[in-house]
Image: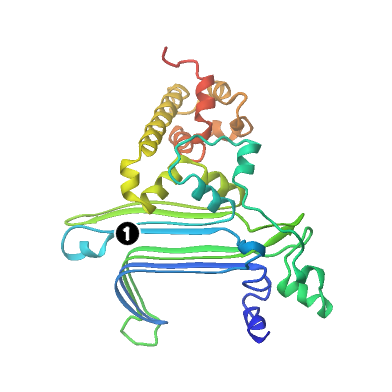
Amino acid sequence: MKIKLLLCLVPFVFTGCVGYNTVLFTTKSNAGLDFDTKPPTAEINISRKEGVVEPVFEGGKTPPVMASFSSQIGSGGGVGRFFFGVDQTFAGGDAAVTMAKLYDNNERIDETPSNVTRFDSGLPLSKLPDANVKRGWLGLKKFFFGLPEPGEVRPFFFGTDSQLGVKVAWNGVGGPYPDTIKIGYNRKEMALAPVTLSNNIIRIPSFLATVDTSTQGSNNVGVNWMQYFATGDSASFLARQYGVRQAMLKRADPKAAAESAAEKAGAQQHEKVVNQAAEMVKWATGVDGKLLPANIDTLVHGTELEASKAQIKVMAPADFQKKLNGTWSLFVFKLWANFPNKPE
């Protein structure tokens, strides 16, 4: 019991008890030089730390979380040897289930009730947890060890901290000498997610964070960086996008990504979507370089983007195309059906 109570002390007292009604999921990655005095650290390598503390329910059921990590050392001499291409995913809830189920699948995932149910991470229980039934201790047992039920609110913390390049920091205690030196790639990820209960089904919030980087460090240092960070329905929706799933396949299994027929077919489909988006944006752009409201009305008619048409009409064409290539890519085929200038 002392150990149980210890897990519930600050800073987790306001979320309940880690391992009973809260999931603590963390990772720490380093690719390069990491020197730090707090805590004492001295690394010149590729290192990765991962950990999760979560409740286990009947039949070994646990709330779903997943993480992946891949690193490739840069080329070139000098500082180039400390620059890396690093790719990571960090997900939980519906987003984690979606990423795992669609590992190398290139199918288009429409936003339909059947697909939402298909990636539902809820876990059914045959009966309520003991702490939810026998609340005891003036309700403290329920607060510390029980699951929040409908009408109850719990905080959800989700954050990442990323650095790529060179970082030197001083705390002032060591005089002219730095207490932190980092060269290369360093990232920390953490989620403190409540486990909720509704109709005897347990869930944790859906969350997703990805990083896709590539660097080169010979005479010139070049950096490419793509990062996603989302919670709730946004995270679940992003996890169903081909671009996010393709990045995960490359991270988790580079050989399979290069050889998979499904991945190649998906890449071709993605290229098709990008080309169609470019044609539609070009058609919808006037001589003044702004989007034509009437053409936008034609494209979005009857689609999920119709509710956002006022926002779209004031966008720069490049921003509209960026949206169609990213989070709105799922709607491109519907807009294309409204496009009057399709080739025969």
At a point 24% along the width and 58% down the height, the residue shown is: 74
* Between 198 and 279, the one nearer to me in the picture: 198
At a point 48% along the width and 23% down the height, the residue shown is: 284
Q: How is the image coloured?
A: rainbow
Image position, residue 255 (x, y; %): 31, 48
Q: Quadrant of the C terminus?
A: top left
Image position, residue 315 (x, y; %): 51, 35
Image position, residue 164 (x, y; %): 34, 62
* Between 15 and 252, the one nearer to me in the picture: 252
Q: Toward which corner of the image does residue 153 lie, by quadrant?
A: bottom right
Q: Toward which corner of the image does residue 154 lie, by quadrant?
A: bottom right
**Disc 1 marks which residue?**
71
Residue 19 can be seen in this image: yes
Residue type, mark 1 in image: Ser
At a point 38% along the width and 39% down the height, the residue shown is: 263
Q: Is residue 344 left or right of residue 14?
A: left
Mark count: 1
Q: Secondary structure at mark 1?
A: strand
Mark 1: give few (<14), some (14-19) or many (20+) Cα within 10 Å: some
- Quick check: 12 above or below 106? below
Q: Which residue occupies the extreme front position in the image?
A: 59
- Quick check: 174 above or below 311? below
